[in-house]
Amino acid sequence: MHVIDLPASLDYKAVDALLDQAAASDGKALIDARHVRWVDPCGIVALLAAGTRLRDRVGTQPLLRLPEPAEVAGYMARMGFFAAADGIFEMDGKPPRRATGGESDVLLEITPITTNSDVHDVVDKVQGRAGLILSRTLAYPTSAVVQFSVILSEVCQNILEHAEAPGWVGAQAYRWQKRLGKNVLVISVADMGRGFKGSLADEHSARFGDRWGDATALEAAFIHGLTRFPDSGRGQGIQQIRKQVRRWDGVISIRSGRARIADVPAWDDTPPLTDGMQDFPGAQITIILPARTDDES
Amino acid sequence: MMNPEPSLPPIQIDVGSLVQRSVATLYSHLVTRPTGRAVRQAIESLLDDAGDTAFSLIDLSEVTVLDFSCADEVVAKLLSRYLEADRPREAYFVIRGVRDLHREPIEVVLERQRLATVAQGEDGSYQLLGNRSAPEDLAWRVVEARGRIEPHELEEAMPDADQRSALADLVRRHLVFADARSGTVHALSRLAAGPA
């Protein structure tokens, strides 16, 4: 059995290593999460994507050994991980039950995106919950909740329109004490579809010739706004998300296939372009929005 | 002697309730391309019952979230359809109830498609949104300030030939209404307000 050990911090920095290991595995796998002490929406969504990849490749569900700290497993339950993981993982141990009723600190639980109405549901949920979190935790103006909803809507539609496969979205705000000394909001989206290269290949690969690959496809969509649709109104979703994330001094990065592309502010060290990773199907999008400081407010 | 106001009763379209009817749900947010497409098609069918010329007030007052995909479908594609050579009829649009949170998606999709529209903000003031030249902007302001310009007033209202040329562009782009019989040019805001 192929064992994938998860790191203590299963956050956005750990996503590529997890996806690479899942892509490289070709037998029954065990994902060992016992030593995970910290997990964010990127880690949770990547775990679902990795599990789906392993299940689809081998034909049997990978085994997931749960985190030992009760608070980590409890958080994953509150985020809706175990509900979303049903049918993807065989659980080694009994997952904690998701608490019902009462207020949750979760901004957006892991939500499967398979239809247009899922996107409406996400926007409805966020409109109801995000105002306080964005204003209190991130010191964003009240109008930011609408801009935030638009980001989520566009990023989820990317799954439906380009991936042509189901995906997940999740979001949570928390404190990055060591890394940034302030609160951040982390949004993660992943799908198991055909990726940017697959989506753009028919329309655009010829003009790139030998240079065509995951990195060039990501550059074409991310930087130049190309899509597979001839309609000139298309392709602005990612461009507008990038613009808004830049205004909020945030990070946006997209992994698709073997490459990852990113818009990186001064406070982060993610490389703008990484290529040559394992070939992971679909796409994974990370958005990190830091709290505004007093002089920005 | 002034020419009479054209008989162009506005068709009022409340997008907030139309989105609920069109997509058969209780959603009130204008998000996703399929939702936008359904709303645009519903607007187009409402215009089917109009005569040769339709004047429509698209009301966004009840819409909180408008994303870029929906703005492209509901605003840009709608305007574009009624400017095409094979358009079903002459149609003029004013987007009402435009708030700051709507302005950016509308501006972005209009700029991208090189379109413009007349918009009315929550405070009741009118403005042009989207792609337009400086002379077009100036000519539109002159028409807007006067409400209407009779043919014999044109040289006095717009002494500069470039401005008059820009006015012709505004007529072609359906950003003002030119009465074919009288030649009078009307600000869409005046038509939206109805007969004085």
Image (cartoon, rainbow, N blue to C red):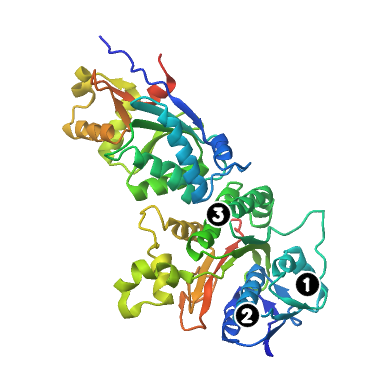
Residue under label 1: A73
Q: Secondary structure at mark 2?
A: helix
Are the residues tagged 2 and 3 within 8 Å (C-beta)?
Answer: no
**Cα separation between marks 1 and 3:** 28 Å
For the question of whether residue B104 can be seen, the reply is no
Q: Residues within 10 Å of mark 2 (few under 14, many from 20)?
A: many
Q: Nearer the viewer, mark 1 or mark 2?
A: 2
Return the x and y of residue A98 as percentages of the image width and height: 80, 63
Q: Quick one: A162 or A12, which is closer to the camera?
A: A162
**Residue type marked 3:** Ser
Are the residues tagged 1 and 3 within 8 Å (C-beta)?
Answer: no
Q: Nearer the viewer, mark 2 or mark 3?
A: 2
**Residue type marked 1:** Ala
**Residue type marked 2:** Leu
Position of B111 with respect to B30 (left or right) is: left
Residue A54 badge: 2
User: Residue at position x 50%, y 68% from top?
Assistant: A265
In which quadrant of the rendered image does the N terminus of chain A lie?
A: bottom right
Chain at tag 3: A
Give the vertical position of A233 relative to A258 (above or below). Answer: above
Q: Secondary structure at mark 1?
A: helix
**Cα separation between marks 2 and 3:** 28 Å
For the question of whether residue A18 can be seen, the reply is yes
Name the outermost residue toward the bottom. Answer: A1
Position of A133 with respect to B91 (left or right) is: right
Residue A153 badge: 3
Return the x and y of residue B191 as percentages of the image width and height: 38, 22
Residue A40 badge: none
Return the x and y of residue A30 as percentages of the image width and height: 70, 84
Q: Quick one: A275 or B41, which is closer to the camera?
A: B41
Residue A190: quarter of image: bottom right
1 and 3 marks on the same chain: yes
